[in-house]
Structures are given as C-alpha cells and as structure tokens.
Amino acid sequence: MSLSLPPAGIGPLAFVALVPLLWLVRDARPRRGLLLGLAFGLAFFGTLLYWIFLFGALAWGALTTVMAAFVGVFGLLAPLMWRSERPVRSLLGLAALWTAIEWARSLWPLGGFAWGELGVTQAGNRFLLPLASVTGVWGITTVVFLVNGLLLLAVDRAAKRRGGAVGEGARGALGFAARQVVAPVVGCIALVFAPALIRIPAPNGPPLDVAAIQVDVLRARGLAPAAQDQMVADMNAAQQLRLVSDPPDLAVWGEAALDPGATSDPVTLGRVRGAIRAVGAPTLSGAVTEGADGRQRTEALLFNGRAELVDRYAKVHLVPFGEYVPWRKELGFISALRQIPIDRTPGPSVHTVQTPGLPPFGTPICYENSFPELDRQMVIEGAQFLVVTIDNASYEYTAASRQHLEMSRLRAVENARWVVHAAVSGISAFIDPTGRVVGETGLFQTTILRHEIRASTAKTLYTRLGDWVPWLSLTLALALLLAPRSRLRRQPPPDPLPERPRILVILPTYNERGTIEPVIRGLLALEDGVDVLVVDDGSPDKTAELVRGVAAGEPRVRLVERPAKAGLASAYFVGFHTALGEGYDLAVEMDSDLSHQPQELPRLLAAARDHHLVIGSRYVPGGAVTNWSRARIALSKGGNLYARIMLGIPLRDATSGFRVFRKGLLAHLVAEPIRSDGYGFQIELALRSWRDGYSVGEAPITFREREHGQSKISRRIVIEALWLVTVWGIKGRLLPWRLPSGQAA
C-alpha cells in the first residue's frame, strides 16, 4: 500500500492494496488476524516512514510498531465482524472499522499520528477528491476500503461461478452468477466516480497576491546553532528584498525562518525588519521564540508593512519526540533524546491571525496540517485562506515533503480554501480549493513562488459538520461487532404429522402432591389422547406415591422415580429419551403446579404442525400472566428482552417451560449434552433449536402463579441464566457458530 503514496505515488494501487489482507483476515481466528494485521502494518508503515531512519533505527522502529499495532487491532476485530452469509453488510462494517481505527490513530497516543491515511492516497484523484468537502478525508478512506472489499467479493463470486454446476438449467444459473459478479464491480465504479458530481463551493472573496519565500538551508549546515539561525534569517531577508519593486499582498517565510539565534540577536532582527519595511507588505514568518518566562514556542509571527508584530499564532499540536519529550525522566536512558534539550510549550488555542488590509487567515504550522480537525477549526474561527508554514529540511531529499504536500491538498478540499504550502526549504506550493496544485518548487531551491489566490467565507459540509464520518463509522462498527451471528442454516419445513400423533407429556415433580393429580386428570381429559410421564426426584411429600396410585388405574400414566433431586434438565432428558425410544411424534414440557393449564395444550399442539418447536408464550398477543406483581412481570420481560438482544433469537418468551418438540428436533438436541438448568436450560434449548435452523414458533398462554407448594426457581438459578446468556452472547459474537459435528458454518 505504501506504493500508493509518495515517493511512488501510484494512487490507484490503493484500490487493490488491501485485498490480500481482507482475504486473509476475514475467516481467520482473532489471534491470527492480529498477527496478520501487525505484519501488514509493519510492512506498510515501515516503508512509508523510511525517512524516520534519519533519526535512528530506534525512532523508526518505535513509530512503525505503534502504528502497525492499529492495523493489528483491525486484524483482531475483523474476523469477529465478518459474516460470510452477509458479505456486503460485513464489508460495510469492516470499512467502518478501518475508518474508526484510522481516526483513533490520529487522536491517540500523544495526540495521534495522522500520516499514512488511506484517503490521502487519492489526493490526485479528480473524481473522488470532491467527496472530502462533505466527509473529510475519512469518507475517501471509507470508499477506498469498500472498493477493495467489493473487488474481493467479485473475485469470490467469479471463482464460485467457474466452479458451478453445468447442465439443465445451468444457463439461468450462470446468468444470475454473472450478475452477482458484475454488481460489485458496478458498485466500485459508482463509489469512485459519483463524487465528481459534488460541487465544491467556489471562493467568494477578494483576490490576494501571495509570495512564498524559500531558501536553501543546507548552505547554513556546519555552522554553530546561533550562526546557522542568523544565516537562514538573512537568506530569507535577501529574498524578501527581491519583492521591493512589486510588493505582494502577503509574503510568507517558512517555519524555522526565524529561530532563537536570529530572534535573540538585535542585529539580525534589525536586518529582517528592514527587509520587511523595504517591501512594505504584511509578512508571515515561521519562528521559534523564547518568552520572558524562558519557555520556547513554535510560532507564526505576522508583521505589518512597517515591520511591526501585529499578531501571532503559537503551535498547539507539538511533535512528540521532536518538539518535546514525553516522559523525559523515565526515558532518560535513551541517549538520542538528548538531541531535544528543551521541551517547547504548546499554544493556548487554535485561532486565526489578521492585519489591516488582509482578511483573517489560518496558520497551521507544519505537523498540525496533518490533522483535519485543526485546519477546520481555523476555518470555523473565520479563516478565509490557510497558510501552512513548514520545515521539512531535516528529512533532506526523502519523500516526507511530498507526502506532506498530499495532505495539504486534502485540507484545501475539505474546507474549500486556498492553501499556501510554504516550506522554508521546499516543497512549497499553492493549492486551490479543488485540491489542484497550481504552483510548486523543488527541495532546497532558493526561490520565490508567487500566485494569486482568493479569500472565501463559503463553508463546506465538512467544515460545518466536522468528523461526522468517523463517529458514524465508530457507531456502525460497534453495532455490527455487537450484533449476534445469524443462524447456521435453515432446516426444511417439518413433515406432516399423523392425523392422531403420539404425544408424551413430561412432568418433572418435586413436592407437587397438591397439584399433580389435577394436572394429570386435565391432560387425560383432552381429546388428543396424550400419554403422561411423571419424573419424580424423591419428593418428601410423597408425590410419587400419589402418582403411583393414579398410574395403577390408568395405563397412559407412568412414573419414573429418582432417589434424590437431580435438576430440571436431567428430568426432562429422561422424558426426551423415553419419547424418542418409544417412537412418540411429539414431546411436551410442562410444569406440574398448574401454572400451565392442561386445557391450553391443544393450542400448542396445533401450532406444532407448522413448527419443530412451539413455546407457550406469555408475551405474545393473547398471552398473559396472572397473580404476578408489575415488578416481577417487568423483571421477566426484561430478562427475555436481554436474551433476545444478546442471542439474536426472535422469541419473546425464551424462558417459558411450556413447550412442544417434534421428534426430529428432539433427536438433534439430545445428541449434545446440555450445560445448564432451570431458566438457562429452557433458553439453551430454544437457542440451539433456532441457531441450527429449526422452525421455532410461539403460541399464547396464560401463566398462573402456583397456589400450592413453593417455586423451585431460586435467585441462583436466575443469576446463572443471566450469566449463561451473557457468555453465549459474547461467544456468539466472537466465534462462529458450530454444527454438532464440529464443522463451522
């Protein structure tokens, strides 16, 4: 991807540069995705920032590694967001994720580092660049990423088309496949070329003649620091005097034109002021100044035509490890940091500068220009054009200066402002509001670059709205990361049931002597001819004895006795295995305390003709709860809502224990062990049924609070269910669902 930026500057390469990374990370495990992202980031930033090597391998390695870590985070999160069944939505999510991470990189750590933004690769793209006036560089980043993703999707679909079946009906299928391939390509074309229709506001202010002065600072190399500063100032003053016969409206000297050795020397400063007075034009100069408090600041100083200092702007966003050293005491063992003996002080705020005869203008200083929000803030404050004072001389003849110029082109379009890109030793340039470079110098040339610009008060949508794209991207990325995965597959509709299906109702009991007989009698009275299996866990109230007596006179009633309380889930599994072993068509879960009324079972049985699983629901239309407080109902509804959101299951009452299972689904469920009990057991069965593609429906019931005995649902069971739902929800987002065979869907 580094080839899409200077020095190669092959912008179109950015549209395919991310394809290998996307292809590798989308189906990777998060840990492998992290490593892939790190490798990609190290390769990209390592080559892009090669010029940092001028300051030592430690500086280059540290910056490259920190920047690569952000791509590593993308690689870590990308597999969690990718949904193979929804590739387009996944690509939108990944584009949002990349944009949000790139934005975060421009903010943190230490104020961020914005070099190498994907959108900057398109500074020369006349079709796509106008989008920056609406979205800032971030929208272009999003589009470039989407083009990469859509091209990968087209390649995927083309590969599937080549491997598709041939034969009868193949022509129609191949036609559909061709359309599936063409659609992403058409999307790419639209994304790249449609922004050309965006109208960038034209400048509406007066014309201004601006002269940018550039000198060859290499001529001062080898001198003592103070002498070097004085020589650079004198070279700028000499070029200023060339303007005497034809003064501009504004002259600009680059950053570091007036450094401490010059500003602290009255003789040199006198020559500088004399040159400015001789021309008689307002002059902006980059400077490093020392205040009365001894603090150094990087500033842009504005002199009027009489060489009086009338305004100044102090750099707010200083370069870490360049203009100050973070954690200086802790990092004192690094000898290279002694090259930065003084920590400069940042300015108090972002603001414009002004002098009579000129409209207010913004003066972002060098590194600040890489941050879109800072230039935008100056325009919001009233800047009618932007003058960027720059000192890239330390980077010698590397691509750093050209890379910086590309960012100024984005700033021009984002705010529809002329940008004067004034470097003390080049590259200097004038950039119009459409991002076109209309004048440019080479590096280390002593020259004057002059052009007429226009001031403007017009505002773009980006200027008005700011970084709305990164915020939207962050929101979308979080939403899709948190979205549960879709079902693995969809099972065929259930087979028709016999006219009179065999039905087994499973009734777990523990101390249900007061209600079990009415429940059994109610079930036996139904016209559906159900059989009843009671699974008793050694009830102290002798429930089993009562059931034994009923079973003695009724062959449709059976009793399974267990010596001790073993849990709801295991009791139902006893019934499930009995139902499967004896060939029942339907198995019914039902409470034994009359909270589930036997006369409501036919409604569930009727719905079972269309679904693999039917849940008796309190919270669908027609359902109700009696004898519960409003607080308890709210708690129950809230728990079910939480399960619906966390697990993505379209059920309003996943905790209900009144259910009808088809035998095919039952066989599928018992093939794997159940890991929960109580409410968690009911939710787990519903989740697995829906997740594995079975049809799950709900039928309204009226739930009645038990009037005999005590509820078996404890606080522990409720907390366990909530915990399990949370764990399942997180796993369902972080890891692909897996079929019982262990094969990923």
Image: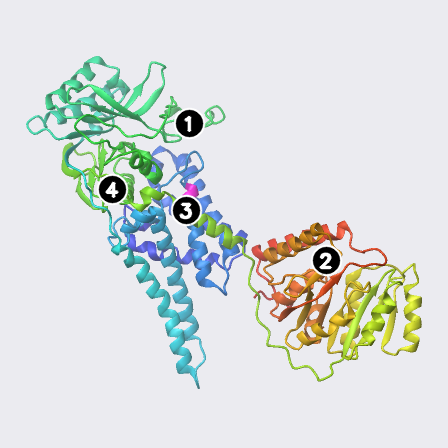
Is residue 714 found left or right of 337 in the rendered image? right
What's the residue type where badge 1 is placed? Val
* Residue topped by disc 3: 470
* Residue topped by disc 2: 679
Residue visible at 45% across and 36% down?
Answer: 109
Q: State the SS at label 3.
A: helix
Whether the magenta-drawn stretch holds residue 685 is answered as no
Q: Nearer the viewer, residue 568 or 705?
A: 705
What's the residue type where badge 4 is placed? Ala
Q: Residues within 10 Å of mark 1 (few under 14, many from 20)?
A: some
Q: Residues within 10 Å of mark 3 (few under 14, many from 20)?
A: many
* Residue found farthest to the left: 245
Q: Earlier in the sequence, mark 1 or mark 2?
A: 1
* Residue topped by disc 1: 325
Query: Dots 1 and 3: beta carbons under 8 Å?
Result: no
Is residue 359 found left or right of 65 in the rendered image? left
Measure the alpha-carbon separation of dots 1 and 3: 29 Å
Q: State the SS at label 4.
A: loop
Q: Nearer the viewer, mark 3 or mark 4?
A: 4
Q: Earlier in the sequence, mark 1 or mark 3?
A: 1
Residue visible at 78% across and 52% down?
Answer: 714
Which quadrant of the structure image shows residue 600?
Answer: bottom right
* Residue topped by disc 4: 458
Which stretch did the figure color magenta?
Answer: 100-105
